[in-house]
């Protein structure tokens, strides 16, 4: 009991320190914020030594994330100091500034196009292989066979993603910055690309977020339908998956998005299909080859059932990052109601109250409620010929006639997978 109490005290203290660090960061007190973030991370690491291996792993991951925030602020602070230093007129013989770090000679590390607030994408950033999106006739045949269309950089950005701020911050720090800050990543031997597994209840925008990631990375988005890969003819999956990865590498930087990836990566111990037992190793083999490729390739798998995925995909070097996409929180639900009702004729509405009575509603659930309220009022106006606004009562009626698509039991199952990996 003593150990548990000490553990809770350390975690609680860490959370309080993180809140103080955020306050300091908001006031641009970078040194104080960095010191507090690092202190909180050390407390989390200390708490990990007092708990079971399962909880300890989760606590260490939290500590690493907090250390990463501190590192981000350090880089931002360095950028700001460098900007201030460069504001003094200096005569340079060349627009390119060279900087030696250890045995590395890095060019363009301080080029004005690269000096941005950490986590932001330079407005004029372009894919390094922009000309790669010239499909050959063979490419067109393959894309048609796979049912893949609209291979392009999506227009959807993180600004279009409602809520999920912690998810977006995690993606920026762990995934996007190595793609954007390539010179700095090279110094520390950080590989661009890799694998992300996004999981969570249906209807909360995993595909939408994947498109936004591709946009922020200025990468081509290749959306894969698993059923097109699972061709009925013997051996075709292995050939198709190999062609797919070669195509994505040729058009790098690119994002390969596998929706419902559990369909092509099921637990081999629980399937009697000899075909799937061959298909899983084929996909694993291609993922293992990501780091040896010359171009940036990001693999994103999305699933509602992460516990059904073969354990081999969850090992280091495959889906290194596992990101939980939960139902929208109270603030996000409020914003979703505003968005979905924005273009409809409506009265003054207490969106905060609507948010408070729709806990566990997914983004799709909230959209359905709004559409149902609009439809009900539309039908009434058709009958009465009495034009009126959609009211809060109309929305409450639609909410009462609905129920969240995510149960508390299912949410608990996702939390268990997040914390224990099973």
Image (tube, grey):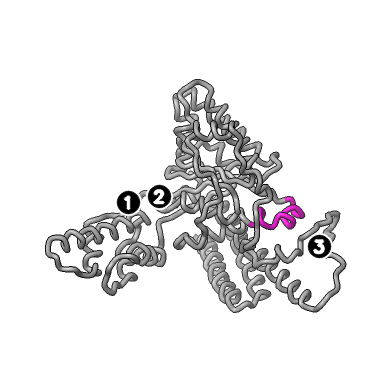
Residue 79 found in image quarter: bottom right
State whether residue 349 is above or below residue 65: below
> Which secondary structure class fits the magenta region best?
helix
Residue 125 percent across, percent down from the top left:
65, 58
Earlier residue among tags 2 and 3: 3
Residue placed under numbered mark 1 in the picture: 405
Front disc: 1 or 3: 3
| Residue on which disc 3 sits | 96
Which residue occupies the foreground of this view, 247 or 16? Answer: 247
Q: Secondary structure at mark 2?
A: loop
Q: Percent x, y for residue 107?
A: 80, 58
Magenta residues span: 177-189
Q: Bin the neighbour count of mark 1 within 10 Å (Cα to Cα): few under 14, some 14-19, many 20 and up.
A: some
Q: Is residue 224 above or below residue 80?
A: above
Q: CA distance from mark 2 to mark 3?
A: 49 Å
Drawn side of residue 148 relative to residue 253, left or right = left
Mark 1: secondary structure: loop
Q: Earlier in the sequence, mark 1 or mark 3?
A: 3
Q: CA distance from mark 1 to mark 3?
A: 55 Å
Asked where in the image residue 109 lies, by quadrant, the reply is: bottom right
Residue drawn at x 57%, y 49% as measured from the top left: 321
Determine the CA span between mark 2 and mark 1. Answer: 8 Å
Does residue 216 sit above or below 331 in this rendering?
A: above
Residue at 61% x, 35% y is 136
Residue 408 shown in magenta: no
| Image point (81%, 62%), residue name | 96
Of the pair 101 and 368, the residue shown nearer to us: 368
User: Where residue 62 sits: x, y (%)?
Assistant: 57, 58
Instruction: Provide residue 308's location: percent of width, then percent of height.
Output: 45, 38
Mark 2 lies on residue: 201
Label ID, residue 115: none
């Amino acid at each position: 009991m003593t150990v548990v109490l000490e553990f809770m005290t350390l975690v609680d203290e860490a959370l309080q320190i993180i809140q103080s660090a955020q306050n300091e960061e908001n006031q641009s007190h970078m040194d104080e914020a960095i010191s507090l973030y690092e202190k909180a991370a050390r407390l989390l690491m200390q708490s990990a030594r007092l708990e079971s291996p399962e909880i300890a792993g989760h606590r260490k991951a939290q500590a690493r994330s907090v250390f990463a925030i501190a590192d981000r602020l350090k880089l931002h602070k360095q950028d700001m100091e460098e900007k201030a230093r460069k504001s003094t007129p200096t005569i340079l013989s060349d627009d390119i500034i060279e900087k030696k770090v250890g045995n590395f000679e890095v060019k363009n590390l301080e080029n004005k196009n690269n000096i941005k607030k950490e986590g932001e994408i330079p407005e004029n950033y372009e894919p390094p292989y922009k000309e790669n999106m010239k499909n050959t006739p063979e490419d067109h045949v393959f894309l048609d066979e796979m049912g893949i269309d609209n291979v392009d950089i999506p227009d959807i950005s993180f600004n279009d993603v409602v809520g999920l701020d912690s998810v977006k911050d995690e993606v920026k720090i762990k995934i996007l910055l190595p793609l954007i800050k390539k010179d700095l990543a090279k110094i520390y031997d950080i590989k661009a690309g890799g694998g992300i597994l996004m999981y969570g209840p249906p209807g909360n925008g995993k595909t939408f977020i994947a498109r936004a990631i591709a946009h922020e990375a200025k990468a081509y988005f290749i959306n894969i339908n698993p059923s097109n890969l699972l061709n009925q003819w013997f051996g075709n999956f292995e050939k198709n998956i190999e062609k797919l990865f070669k195509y994505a590498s040729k058009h790098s930087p690119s994002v390969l998005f596998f929706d419902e990836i559990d369909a092509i990566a099921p637990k081999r111990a629980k399937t009697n299909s000899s075909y799937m037992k061959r298909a899983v190793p084929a996909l694993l083999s291609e993922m293992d080859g990501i780091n040896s490729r010359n171009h940036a390739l990001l693999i994103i798998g999305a699933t509602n059932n992460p516990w059904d995925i073969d354990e081999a995909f969850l090992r280091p070097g495959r889906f290194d990052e596992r990101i939980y996409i939960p139902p929208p929180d109270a603030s996000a639900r409020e914003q979703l109601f505003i968005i979905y009702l924005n273009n409809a004729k409506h009265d003054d509405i207490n969106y905060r109250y609507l948010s408070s009575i729709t806990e566990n509603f997914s983004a799709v659930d909230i959209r359905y409620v709004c559409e149902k309220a609009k439809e009900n009022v539309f039908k009434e106006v058709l009958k009465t010929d009495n034009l009126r606004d959609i009211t809060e009562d109309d929305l409450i009626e639609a909410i009462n006639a609905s129920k969240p698509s995510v149960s508390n039991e299912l949410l608990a199952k996702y939390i268990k997978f997040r914390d224990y990996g099973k």
